[in-house]
Image: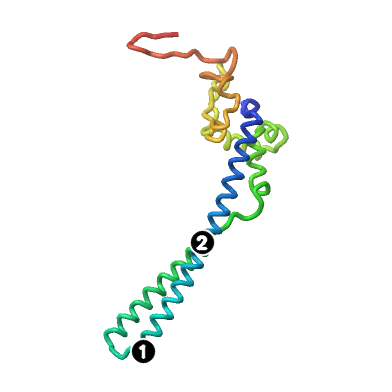
Amino acid sequence: MVKLLQPAPKLIEMATAMFKAAWGARRAQVKNIQASAKREIQRLEKETETVLARIMSTENEIIIRRYEEKVVTLEKQKALMVENLAQQAEPDGAFEEKLELAFRLLSNPFEIWDQGTTAARRLVLKLAFVEPIEYHRNKGARTAALSFPFKALGGDAESQFCYGAAGENRTLDLSLTKGVLYL
């Protein structure tokens, strides 16, 4: 079953190009968000300095209290912006470095299955199928539900399996329509 999951090379190329574009877009988005946050922090600092200068020049206690409340609000906003800036993480490393193994698995899961250890085989099964593959003692392996990446890339499994394993072990397509059994 794993051997049949290999998608067409054109689909892998297209998916790789899409992920590279998304990777680049995320990097650009993070840079824009960081630049915007830094500008906002500078604006808040400037406004805080302006309010503090007004406090120094004012003698009215009520106005001073209002200005102090404004300074506290500005400092809270600044702290929030600093926290948001720290949380905006740019993707580390190069695209190829981070997603090479994932695309290697998607492009040819059987290669990893064939050359891998038992742990690698279990990983391939967990990533390729939504649930464990059912096996019937007399009829063989049942049709397994593919995980989303393999469904999206359209491996050959859809054309090879229909309600069970290929060939003699395939189960009949039974459907009930208006109370009549069709084989």
60 vs 125: above or below: below
Between residue 37 and residue 164, name the one nearer to us: 37
Q: Position of residue 72 (x, y in %)?
A: 37, 77
**Residue that carries the numbered disc 2 in the rendered image:** 87
The mark closer to the camera, 2 or 1, is 1
Q: Residue furthest right?
A: 115
Q: CA distance from mark 2 to mark 1?
A: 38 Å
Q: Position of residue 43 (x, y in %)?
A: 45, 72
Q: Quadrant of the C terminus?
A: top left
Name which residue type carries label 2.
Gln
Dot placed on the residue nearer the N-terminal end, 2 or 1: 1
60 vs 100: above or below: below
Between residue 127 and residue 136, name the one nearer to us: 127
Asked if residue 139 lies left or right of residue 70, the reply is: right
- Please report the residue visible at 35 percent of the width from the left and 77 percent of the height from the top: 70
Residue 168: mark = none
Q: Position of residue 133 (x, y in %)?
A: 55, 28
Instruction: Please tell me whether mark 2 sits on a helix, a strand or a loop.
Output: helix
Between residue 123 and residue 16, name the one nearer to us: 16
Instruction: Please tell me whether mark 1 sits on a helix, a strand or a loop.
Output: helix
**Residue that carries the numbered disc 1 in the rendered image:** 57
Name which residue type carries label 1.
Ser
The image quarter in which residue 170 lies:
top right
